[in-house]
Amino acid sequence: MDSLITAAARALAAGDPLGALKRVALRDDAPALALRGIAMAQLGDLPRAKELLRRAARGFGQKEAVARARCVVAEAEVALASRDLSWPAKALDSARATLEAHGDRINGAHARYLEIRRLLLIGRVEEAEQMLAELEFDSLPPALQTVHELLVAGIAVRRVRGRKARAALARAEGVALRARIPALTAEVESAWLVLNTPAARLIAGSEERSLLLEDVEALLVSDALVIDACRGVIRDAQNVVSLTSRPVLFALARAMGEAWPGDVSRDVLLARAFGAKFIDASHRARLRVEIARLRNVLREMADVRATKRGFVLAPRSAREIVVLARPVEDEHAAVLAVLSDGEAWSSSALALALGASQRTVQRAIDSLAATGKVQSLGRGRARRWITTPVPGFTTTLLLPTPLPME
């Protein structure tokens, strides 16, 4: 490898893409194309980066398997940054195997971290956690150690384990200082922002206040009966019931939870659960049926008692009933939660991350675009969507990951 290629590679490793381009910008040999692609990715020109990396991979001969594998890993990183979640994972896995077989442990580990990041983006938290636990990172360079700790924190955040996330970010911050790469430092700062801004609202009787992620973690292990409007579940210290597929029952439970220890009138319950404006005998009959169903669902946690004007929840073992609500109520909150990372997403990538159909996601995007909450970039298949995060709130609890049930 000639001196210019070596100097450019060192500049990229130090987070200096302009310094790298000064050395190889006019060269079209395969190593220079690969370095130029990585430099353009660091500068944010992802389409150009992808093109250069593909040219570099083609430029390396069949005997240069390691160099080709490194190009595949770099292209996978560009795809992840551009939220191209349909990029073939098998190609990355094959490249990783090639790198590990040839003793390139660092780039092999980098490939594994990319796999874990993709799994985390699409909500496959258990797989990401298992793969991360198998990695030995102590002997890796500071940059990859920082990535490791960021992933530990990211998984902890999705698991609603605020204390574990804070400890991992503290370690990531220390290692990032040794790495001396501005982009990594900025990523750590962004992760800190998630922990230091409200993640949810607590509604308890007449009180309503914002909660940090660590407050939510403490609430979920407390002796309160929690009606969790972020994930559509109801839980106490011993039991968890999911009502995500039964929105009427959850609406009834939430209305009574917000009014506890008082009761809720039948008219209010009909309006909250069914949107009824004009109430007749059929509505009241349906309410009786749904209340009976709710009473059966919550039989281990609470009783649903009739009062003169409506119904009230009575916890069996919990000391109180509280409602955990989203920081900002929105019909398409899950889409906004994914877009809140500031990256440009395609509708197909959003559908993959949310586990929904692309048509459902497109309808949500159209609705959000009509109200100015999201903006589009590009046209046709290259169209991407972005949004500005809601100031003062983090959307962790809106992401489509089940809350811990242990």
Image (cartoon, rainbow, N blue to C red):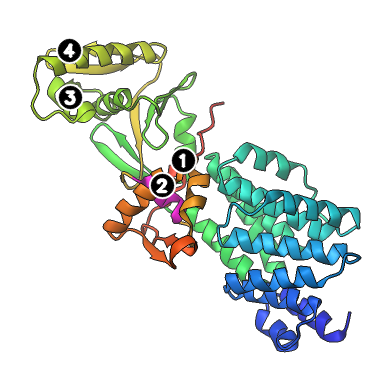
Q: CA distance from mark 3 to mark 2?
A: 29 Å
Residues at marks 3 and 4, CA–CA distance in whole angstroms: 11 Å
Q: Foreground mark, 1 or 3?
A: 1
Instruction: Find the distance from the CA under tag 4 to the CA under tag 1.
Output: 34 Å
Q: Looking at numbered disc 3 in the image, what kind of residue is underneath it?
A: Leu
Amino acid type of disc 2?
A: Val
Dot 3: what SS? Answer: helix
| Measured Cα–Cα span from mark 2 to mark 1 | 7 Å
Query: To which residue does mark 1 refer?
Result: 356
* Dot 4 crowding, Cα within 10 Å, few <14, some 14–19, many 20+: few
Reading the image, the residue beneath label 3 is 270
The mark nearer the N terminus, 4 or 1, is 4
> Residue 355's x, y, as percent?
50, 40
Q: Are marks 2 and 1 in contact (CB under 8 Å)?
A: yes
What are the residue bounds of the magenta stretch? Answer: 332-339
Q: Taking the image as drawn, is residue 174 in sight?
A: no
Outermost residue to the front: 380
Disc nearest the viewer among 2 and 4: 2
* Sequence-earlier tag: 3 or 2: 3
Q: Which mark is residue 285?
A: 4
- For marks 3 and 2, give the one nearer the viewer: 2
Q: Are marks 1 and 3 in contact (CB under 8 Å)?
A: no
* Proximity of marks 4 and 1: CB atoms separated by less than 8 Å: no
Which comes before the other along the chain, label 3 or label 4? 3
